[in-house]
Image (spheres, grey):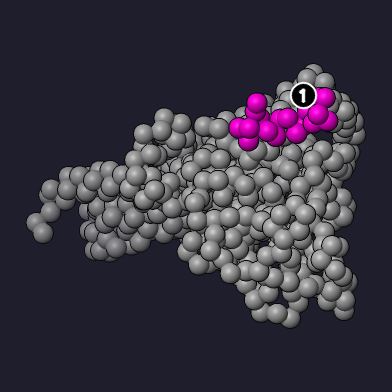
Amino acid sequence: MNFFSKIFELFSTEKYMEIIFEGFKTTLIISVFAAILGLLIGTVVALVSISEDSPVTRVLKAICKVYITIIRGTPMALQLFIMAYVIFTIRGFPEEITAIIAFGINSGAYVAENIRGGILSVDIGQTEAGRALGLSSRVTMFKIVIPQAIKNVIPAIGNELIALIKETSIVSMIGMFDLTMAAKIIGSGNNMASYVVPMSVVALFYLAIVYLLTFAIKRIEKRLRASDKR
Amino acid sequence: MKKIISLALVLLMLVGCVGALASCGNETIIVHTNAFFAPFEYFDGTEIKGVDVEIMNMVGKELGKDIEFTNVEFSAIIDNVQKGDVCDAGAAGITITDERKEKVAFSIPYYTSIQYVILPSDSTIATRTGENGEYIVWEALEGKKIGTQLDTTGWIYTDGEINATEDNDYGYAGVLYGTNTTHKGFDNAQLAADGIASNIVDCVIIDELPAQYIISKNSGLKCVPLYYSGETQAEDAPVQEQYAICVNKENTELLEAINKVLTSLLNDKDENGVNAIEKMVMKHMGMEK
């Protein structure tokens, strides 16, 4: 049997498609909720790290710095492993939540740096102008700097979301039933007994998710850039 | 800002509550497995099935508790059972070894398996022929690239034969020591077997039944049993091992229930002397009469 007839076999077997859609569902759930959690954490951490110095924020800033260093400096697989086998070792704890938290925390560190970069990329003159007009520093930040920063940050955030979706493929490590796991199951001895075809088919599904996301990000970017002269 | 922080805190607390609630129900026995080991455990659609699942469900009935199977990496099962906080037992066609005995308690053995070698059909590796047909001895694998599933007995034996001398920690002489034989560990046997076609490995060492499953679906492969070579050819002996279910050392109640079920299954023989477990194996292999 050649490659293409095996692909046809995979798509025409109901059992295999059921496995793939089950995995597809898990991948989507983890990606969506982890992205939301990551954006929340990222925004908070970014705002803390650009806030003005005071005794309280200095402590918070130190915490954020340690968080970003550790999360960006260690492999995602290790973080997931620790989350599943060291922290959430509660009987019957839903694995989806473990994974969402692990990926959310990971994504948060990258998003935080992206957002911080976006805010710093807005010319200091904008802040000075706002302050000179008598606006408070908070109003200047939220009404003048951040709206401009968001525009700069969108491509980088999109990048991070794409990376996040593809990185969820390691959750099969803790036994979760995601798309990659679906490929492993279809490729296992009692099903197709070859990994090549199911892995390639599953890659198409990842491609489809990422393509849709890219499309959505492009649309958002276009809307935000509507007022630009460039 | 305060709102966002408080929102995050509330979320965290919610998660904690869910966790606490989930941990209340202690009536379920959680069994860890690696469902890539047909016919003992495998995914049929999205469900885990197999011989081990049937046995554990009988144990559940015996104790009046629910049994829940969770799929994890094979190498994690023993450690998880030893810690005992996420699972009570491991049922994954686990071979009894001395190292594993130190960490967990084993039930009585319920199945005897032989290690098999998966090779390309046109392989030039020398085989011997004995009473029960063709077989391979360890010495024949000299200079080959051997693939195994990480942490399975195939991996442990291969590692021993390649690295052991009487002077190091192993304490015995490995027959492949000092030869340029290489050894690669894979996540599961199927991946290792796929490596044969792509020249990553020359042969794969894995238990008998998974090996037969793999070769039945791949036309270019064959499998032969693996033997230790004796003084004379008549003394060659197969690489044999026994499967058992492992339980956390403190959970004697569960261990007793498992032993009781296994004993009754092993004694439940038909007129041909085939016991109930062998029948289950045949059923899951699709060889039921």
Q: Residue furthest left?
A: A229
Q: Depth check: give the residue in front, A9 or A112.
A: A9
Q: How many marks?
A: 1
Is B66 on the left or on the right of A166, as rendered? right
Q: Residue at x 59, y 44 (%)?
A: B213
Q: Depth check: give the residue in front, B221 or A139.
A: B221
Residue B279's place in the image compared with A215, above or below, is above
Q: Residue at x 55, y 32 (%)?
A: B44
Q: Residue at x 36, y 50 (%)?
A: A3
Picture coordinates of residue B134, whole percent (x, y): 69, 58
Q: Secondary structure at mark 1?
A: helix
What residue span does the magenta drawing correspond to? B270-289
Residue B173's place in the image compared with B204, above or below, is below
Q: Is residue B275 magenta?
A: yes
Q: Chain of mark 1?
A: B
Q: Is residue A222 magenta?
A: no
Q: Depth check: give the residue in front, B207 or A205.
A: B207
In the rendered image, the quadrant that contains the C terminus of chain A is: bottom left
